Amino acid sequence: MKIRNINLSLNAAIGMLCLGVTSLTPVLARADATYYNEFGGRAGIHAVVTDMLTNVLADDRIKSYFTNANIPVLNASLTNQVCMLEGGPCKFDENMKKIHESLGITQAAFNALAEDLQKSMNQHNIPLAAQNDLLSKLAPMEPAIVTK
């Protein structure tokens, strides 16, 4: 049986949380770097993250969350996070709960950021399987990020 790749909406990805995937710790990277390579390695991931942040900063739904953010530092951190999650050699060991606990992030804001990420991945022609893999690794972090 062949399974088609489906681009997950964040709500579908978060729906997986209801199935018991509720860890607050980052998901371990893949054993191989297939998806890392499909993102174009670290340079490709950096380009996706840079464009995602451009989308976020133009997104009236969520740009206020980033008013005081150090965007270059955030860009580097998110690049490392995606790189690690997709099987690359980068290190990311930030405590997601601690980083987000005082930000008052809503479910709607979490979903909006995911939409901006998907938009960026589509702009960079990231294969759907790689997009879905990343979203499935980010979705379990939702309880640590959404605090309001």
Image (cartoon, helix red, strand yellow):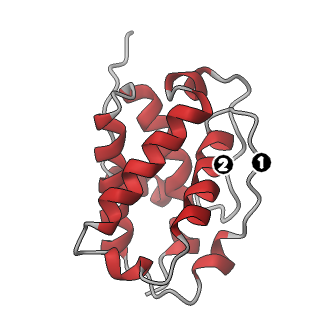
Q: Residues within 10 Å of mark 2 (few under 14, many from 20)?
A: many
Where residue 41 sits in the image (x, y, percent)? Answer: 59, 28
Q: CA distance from mark 2 to mark 1?
A: 6 Å
Residue at (60% x, 20% y) in the render = 34
Secondary element type, mark 2? helix
Seen in the picture, residue 92 relative to 129 is either above or below; the reply is: below
N-term mark: 2 or 1: 2
Determine whether the residue tagged by mark 1 lies in a helix, strand or loop: loop
Q: Which residue is mark 1?
A: 91
- Quarter location, residue 8: top left
The reply to whether residue 136 is visible in this rendering is yes
Q: Is residue 49 left or right of residue 92?
A: left
Q: Amino acid at mark 2?
A: Asn
Dot 2 corresponds to which residue?
A: 80
Amino acid type shown at disc 1: Lys
Closer-to-camera residue (17/113): 113
Residue 15 visible to the viewer:
no
Mark 1 surroundings: few (<14), some (14-19) or many (≥20) residues within 10 A: some
Q: Horizontal and vertical percent for residue 57?
A: 33, 68
Q: Quadrant of the C terminus?
A: bottom left
* In contact (CB < 8 Å): disc 2 and disc 1: yes
Q: Position of residue 51 (x, y in %)?
A: 38, 49
Q: Is residue 30 left or right of residue 18?
A: right
Residue shown at 62% from the left, 64% from the top: 73
User: Is 61 on the left-hand or right-hand side of 10?
Assistant: left
Furthest-top residue in this view: 1
